[in-house]
């Protein structure tokens, strides 16, 4: 939230007060100069009088854009992505059991409707039982099967299969977040804008690197595409302050999923145009969708970007950490894994996808576990429902 937005909101709440300015200042024990400072829109989140002033206006620091300081330990080495963090609250087995239990929970229609409103329009409403990913995936399968039986519209097949796995997984990882910095509108924005922008950056870099063939070409592709998505994340993130690395994982996952979906659509269309057979395009899309359970841009960007965020000691991203040995190792590993997958024959690709299904999901789970190293946010249940959204 900008200073001007804070000032407008505070002035609006002051105008709703029934007390005179002098009565209001006497009640809070503040001077006229202090009142002018507080109304200016500048944040004074460490000033107890300022917090009392906000409370009198039925506001709190979270409503005005305050983000808790980063409480998790910064990454020290690439191995930190593979081992649980040291914390009494971080109990991987119990956390995993709870995760599976919540994913199996059934929800009522009223719960889904009310929670969906929160996902779309609010922040700070805490963890919810995941349900959107299941309904989206089931809906995609039903429409796809119905289309095959009745209409066989190639465009619908292409869109549905391209979205099926990457977007479903994106909804799942989003629903496991605490929703204190990204809502569903933000995720959709990152998915569409991030995917399109990263593809555009890829083509721009490709004009410089060209299109080598063979193994060199696949290595160049891996590095170019991972660089393009990282640059896109760095551009979109601007001055966002991440409280935890899992939210950064969701952020990167959304950009990568957008890239993955649009690229898969392109593969499907090219397969149809090349062979002239619609079924060939469908099989290409089904194959890529199955591979997306273990490999793909959603996983790769979802690991590279939070690795950069995790190296920062504060909640403000330190972009100079791209030169940190840990980040360089992670970036090289993902880029070369990407290149190896592109270069390999079909049987090897299956093996890499199976390995990725264990490795990349496990790393994502480690990012998820890092949330348990945080202290609970104070006043979390009383947060102002109109609190800022990053993209507003």
Image (tube, grey):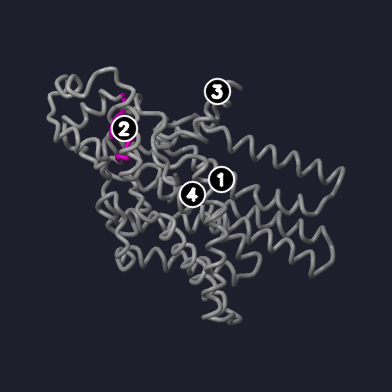
Query: For the residues carrying marks 4 and 2, which lies nearer the camera in this image?
Result: 2
Compare marks 3 and 4 and give the one earlier in the sequence.
3
Residue topped by disc 1:
169
Which residue is most to the right?
150
Q: Position of residue 78 (x, y in %)?
A: 34, 59
Considering the numbered disc 3 on the image, is that residue within a helix, a strand or a loop?
A: helix
Does the residue at mark 1 contact the one at mark 3 (Cβ under 8 Å)? no
> Residue 111 shows which numbered tag?
3
Image quadrant containing the C terminus: top left
Q: Is residue 194 magenta?
A: no
> Residue 361 shows which numbered tag?
4
Q: Main secondary structure of the magenta part?
A: loop
Does the residue at mark 3 contact the one at mark 4 (Cβ under 8 Å)? no
CA gap between label 1 and label 3 equals 21 Å
Compare marks 4 and 2 and give the one earlier in the sequence.
2
Taking the spot 22% from the left edge, 28% from the top edge, the residue there is 53
Query: For the residues carrying marks 3 and 2, which lies nearer the camera in this image?
Result: 2
Look at the picture and state if 85 lies above or below 80: above
Residue topped by disc 2:
11
Q: From which residue to which does the magenta span run? A: 58-66
Specify the quadrant of the image occupied by residue 88: top left
């Amino acid at each position: 939230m900008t200073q001007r937005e804070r000032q407008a909101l505070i002035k609006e709440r002051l105008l709703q007060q029934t007390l005179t300015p002098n009565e209001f200042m006497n009640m809070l024990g503040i001077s006229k100069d202090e009142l002018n400072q507080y109304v200016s829109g500048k944040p004074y989140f460490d000033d107890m009088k300022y917090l009392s002033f906000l409370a009198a206006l039925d506001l709190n620091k979270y409503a005005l854009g305050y983000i808790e300081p980063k409480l998790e330990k910064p990454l020290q080495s690439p191995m930190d992505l593979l081992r649980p963090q040291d914390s009494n609250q971080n109990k991987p087995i119990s956390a995993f059991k709870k995760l599976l239990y919540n994913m199996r929970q059934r929800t009522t229609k009223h719960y889904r409707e009310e929670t969906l409103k929160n996902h779309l329009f609010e922040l700070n409403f805490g963890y919810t039982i995941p349900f959107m990913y299941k309904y989206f995936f089931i809906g995609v399968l039903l429409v796809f099967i119905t289309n095959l039986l009745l209409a066989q519209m190639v465009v619908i097949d292409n869109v549905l299969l391209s979205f099926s796995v990457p977007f479903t997984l994106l909804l799942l990882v989003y629903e496991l977040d605490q929703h204190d910095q990204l809502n569903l509108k933000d995720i959709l924005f990152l998915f569409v804008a991030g995917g399109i922008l990263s593809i555009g950056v890829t083509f721009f870099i490709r004009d410089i690197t060209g299109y080598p063939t063979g193994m060199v070409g696949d290595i160049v592709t891996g590095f170019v595409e991972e660089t393009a998505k990282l640059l896109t994340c760095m551009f979109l993130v601007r001055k966002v302050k991440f409280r935890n690395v899992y939210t950064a994982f969701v952020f990167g996952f959304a950009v990568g999923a957008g890239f993955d979906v649009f690229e898969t659509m392109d593969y499907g269309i090219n397969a149809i145009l090349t062979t002239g057979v619609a079924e060939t395009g469908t099989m290409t899309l089904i194959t890529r969708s199955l591979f997306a359970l273990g490999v793909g841009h959603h996983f790769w960007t979802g690991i590279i970007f939070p690795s950069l965020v995790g190296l920062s000691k504060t909640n403000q991203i330190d972009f100079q950490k791209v030169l940190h040995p840990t980040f360089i190792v992670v970036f090289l590993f993902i880029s070369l894994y990407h290149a190896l997958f592109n270069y390999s024959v079909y049987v090897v690709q299956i093996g890499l996808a199976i390995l990725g299904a264990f490795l990349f999901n496990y790393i994502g789970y480690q990012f998820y576990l890092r949330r348990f190293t945080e202290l609970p946010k104070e006043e979390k249940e009383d947060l102002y429902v109109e609190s800022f959204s990053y993209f507003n």
